[in-house]
Each structure stands twice: as structure tokens, then as C-alpha cells.
Amino acid sequence: MIAVPPVADLAEVLIACPSVTPATGLVFDCLEAQLRPLGFAVHRFLAGEAPDGPVENLFAVRRGPSGSRHLAFAGHLDVVPPGEGWTSGPFLPERRPSPGGELLFGRGSVDMKGAIAAMVAAAALVPADAGTISFIITGDEEGPATHGTLALIDHMRAAGEQPDLCLVGEPTSVARLGDTVKIGRRGSVNIWLEVEGREGHVAYPHLADNPVPRLVALLAELDALVLDEGTDWFQASNLEITDIAVGNPATNVIPPKATARISIRFNDCHSGESLAGQVAAIAARHGATARAVISGEAFLTRPGAFSDMVAAAIHAETGLEPELSTSGGTSDARFLKNLCPVIEFGLCNATMHKRDEAVALADLQTLARIYAAIAHNALGD
């Protein structure tokens, strides 16, 4: 078995840095201090302004021989707000025994400072002459994600950095470390709907134009849509009504306006633009307007050499044959897929975003070994 640096120690240092999104400062100082002794050149920069920024981003690279392959590790150091009710401080990492082995508690232990620590440990196991390894790390994944990975991609393109493969450390595992690998994600589009009417007294409806029945009819038509039946690798696309508002405090007034919001998670049968257009056309028939914001497009890294490599490394350490999945929400892989083939694999996700978030110390060590094996194979070492 490969001897791995103490991943939990690395993770504790990162967890101890409060880094609620958008993250800057100390947590990046700590990661830089872990990477520089391994031979990485570290580039940090701020992007964006309030309210969504500033966001700190980090690109670190250790170059292999000229012409060698390039594997990028990607992830985020920002975390969601911890909330109340923690057994111990969310940014005071604490190890505790459990029936299944020792656990490390703290916000970000799973999503995803633990995985970043495992990536650092893995990089320490790969000889510098094996090939190029880089880290693409943002402080803006849990928030709007407007000044994070997108800005990093622009930075890399300007610098001529082009990875061959990218591994994102999102917590993809479900019941056991290694049971699930993400090879794609559905796209996401949110659409705001508005129906204008004309206010008036409820006793004189002929003098008014009630927008609510038109909005209800529009939402009923949208709710009845069958967008597709799913594909070989994706579940069916789904449209959900997420908000309805009239804002009418009076019981005897027909309101002047009614609004709603829908969210569509879609597979690769569609684009965000095509769905926005479809909804806008339906809305127009009901006298409504539609404004769409596309969060990301669906993508698929087709099963092949890369997924086989990841699966083989997982099987060697855990004995599991991972499920190749496209389920779940969005991640920054939706941006990174524009650089190179991208796969997501990381820790068990049962406690992510919850109070008392915790990771098994044994899983941290195992994950580092899996990442190291992937890096060796990806670089052809």
C-alpha cells in the first residue's frame, strides 16, 4: 500500500480557516504554503466586486518535462455558511471516534477541503518528472460562481495553460467512498415569468384585467410539458415551479401584476437557449414575458479511457466498481468541460452542507491514494 502524507493534518489546516463564500485570504495562504514546498508555482488573483465579490482564485502548476501530459486537479475552498447547532465549532476541526473509525468534523471537511487536502497529498506522491500537475482552485463555487472558475479559465487561456484531463474533487460518493463517479451533469436554467394586468375593484371585474388566471393557465401548461424521456446517460429533464407572487394585501382589489419563477434541469437533448425560447413562446401566448438565466449547459464526458482509469484506481483501493452517473445538481465542472475532458470524484456526500459535517479519516487517506494512482496513469508515469 502506498504511504500517504497525513491528509487529515492538511485538511485540518484548511478547515480552520473560515471561508464562507466568497472566500479570500487566509485559506488561500494555507493552501499556497502546502503547495510551494512540492515545487508548485502559485498564482493568486482577485476577481469581481461586491456583492458577489471580491473572490480569490488560485492556479498552481508544477511543470513536467516539455511535451509531457498535464493533469489538473480542480475544486473550491469556499464553504456554505455553517448555521447554528454544531456540537463543536464549525471552523475548529475536531477528531472524534465513531463505530466505523475516527471522524474529522468541521465545515468543508467533505465539501471540499478534505478532497483538496487529498489532492495535495497525492501530488506529493507523484515525481515532478512524471508530467505536469496543476491546481484550479476558486473561492466562488458555493455562491453565484460568476468570478471563480470562469475567471480561472480566462487566466489559464491567457497563460497558454491547457490540461489534457481534469479531475474535480466534488463529493460524489453516496454510501461508500468510490461507489459513484460523475461523468456529466444536467444543465440548469431559471426563468422569471411576468403577467401584466390592470388593477380594479373585485365587484367590477369588467373594468379591470386580472393577470392571475392567465398566470395560472401558463403555469399549468408549463407543468404539463414532457420535455423528454431521458437518455442512456441522463435522467429525464424536469421543470419545476419554484415561486408564485402577486403581492396583493387587499381582499377587494384585482392586482395589476402576477409573477412566477420556474427552474429547469435538463439533459443533453436540450440547450438552455432552446428551453428559454420554448418557454418564452408559451408565455407569449398567455400574454406573459419570460426572462431566463442559464446557469450551465448539460455535458457528458463519454465513458472511455479517462473513466476507465478512474474506475481502475478506485477498484484497486476499495474493491468497488463505481457507478458512472450524471445525477445531482450543477458544479464547476460545467465550466471546466470547456478546457478538456472532466470527471468528478470525491468523498461521501451524506453530511455536506449539514451541521456537524464530517469525513472519515480513513477515507481521506484512501482518496489520496486513488488520486495519486489516477495522476500516475494520466501522466503516463
Image (cartoon, grey):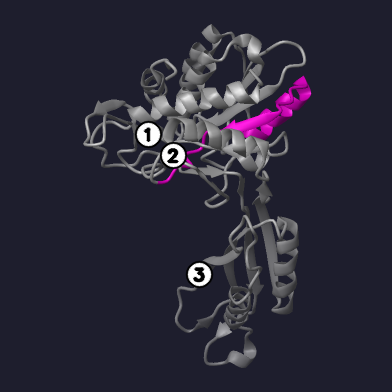
Q: Give the range drawn in magenta.
A: 148-174
Q: Mark 3 points at which residue?
A: 247
Q: Distance between the residues labelled 1 and 3?
A: 37 Å
Residue that appears at 54% across and 24% down: 373
Quadrant housing residue 293: bottom right
- Does residue 87 show up magenta in the picture? no
Quadrant housing residue 344: top right
Where is residue 174 drawn, in percent x and y? 42, 46
Q: Distance between the residues labelled 1 and 2?
A: 8 Å
Q: Name the residue under label 1.
A: 107
Q: Left of 191 or right of it: where is 103?
A: left
Q: Mark 2 points at which residue?
A: 80
Q: Which of 70 and 381 is in front in this view?
A: 381
Q: Distance between the residues labelled 2 and 3?
A: 30 Å
Q: Is residue 321 visible?
A: yes
Where is residue 370 drawn, in percent x and y? 49, 28
Residue that appears at 27% across and 38% down: 86
Q: Is residue 48 visible?
A: no
Q: Left of 351 or right of it: where is 299?
A: right
Crowding near the residue tagged with mark 1, few <14, some 14–19, many ≥20 C-alpha atoms within 10 Å: many
Crowding near the residue tagged with mark 2, few <14, some 14–19, many ≥20 C-alpha atoms within 10 Å: some
State if disc 2 and disc 1 touch (CB < 8 Å). Answer: yes
Secondary structure beneath dot 3 equals loop
Residue that appears at 78% across and 21% down: 160
Q: Nearer the viewer, residue 192 or 126?
A: 126
Which three-letter amino acid code belongs to the residue tagged 3?
Gly
- Does residue 150 show up magenta in the picture? yes
